[in-house]
Image: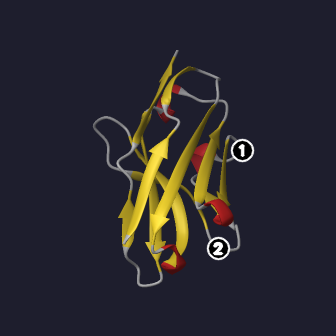
């Protein structure tokens, strides 16, 4: 089992920045990829970014150049630095961890609201 807890969401103005954090606990040796997903009101959950064990990062096109994902294995944490936020970034952001067996774990989410 892997437990994930997100923090850092909130209300920010367009163009502002937020940093989300994800604290992981449990059987972490089985985790390969960690990432962030988001779900905007009335929309399906979408993948935002992910980072593998060798810190190789990937991003959805809409956030490239604005968001940075990082992972600190020694601290069992993962972060998402979000800059130049837009109204379309408003969503509940979820931390995700995938194990070597393909099992996915999810946090409960943290709300990010970008106001104009």
Q: Position of residue 6 (x, y in %)?
A: 46, 46
Q: Residues within 10 Å of mark 2 (few under 14, many from 20)?
A: few
> Compared to 115, does 26 lie above or below?
below
Q: Residues within 10 Å of mark 1 (few under 14, many from 20)?
A: few
| Residue shown at 60% from the left, 30% from the top | 85
> Compared to 69, does 66 lie above or below?
above
Instruction: Give whichever of 43, 56 is nearer the camera.
Output: 56
The numbered mark at residue 23 is: none
> Compared to 3, does 52 lie above or below?
below
Q: Residue furthest left?
A: 42
Quick one: label 2 or label 1, which is nearer the N terminus? 2
Q: Position of residue 50 (x, y in %)?
A: 57, 61
Q: Check whether the beta carbons of the residues at disc 2 and disc 1 lie within 8 A of each other.
A: no
**Which element carries disc 2, helix, strand or loop?**
loop
Q: Position of residue 64 (x, y in %)?
A: 66, 48
Instruction: Give whichever of 50, 70 is nearer the camera.
Output: 70
Instruction: Give whichever of 20, 45 is nearer the camera.
Output: 20
The colour scheme used to paint the residues is secondary structure
Q: Quadrant of the N terminus?
A: bottom left
| Residue shown at 32% from the left, 42% from the top | 43
User: Residue tagged by mark 2?
Assistant: 53
Horizontal side of 103 relative to 76 (left or right) equals left
Q: Residue furthest top?
A: 116
Rendered image quadrant of residue 90? top left
| Residue shown at 48% from the left, 27% from the top | 10
**Which element carries disc 1, helix, strand or loop?**
loop
User: Residue tagged by mark 1?
Assistant: 65
């Amino acid at each position: 089992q892997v437990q994930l807890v997100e923090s850092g969401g909130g209300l920010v103005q367009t163009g502002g920045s937020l940093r989300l954090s994800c604290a992981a606990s449990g059987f972490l040796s089985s985790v390969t990829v960690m990432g962030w997903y988001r779900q905007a009101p009335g929309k399906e959950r979408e993948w935002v970014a992910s980072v593998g064990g060798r810190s190789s990062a990937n991003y959805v096109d809409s956030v490239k150049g604005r968001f940075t994902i990082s992972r600190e294995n020694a601290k069992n944490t993962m972060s998402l630095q979000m800059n130049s936020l837009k109204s379309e970034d408003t969503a509940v952001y979820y931390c995700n961890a995938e194990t070597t067996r393909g099992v996915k774990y999810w946090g409960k989410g943290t709300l990010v609201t970008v106001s104009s």
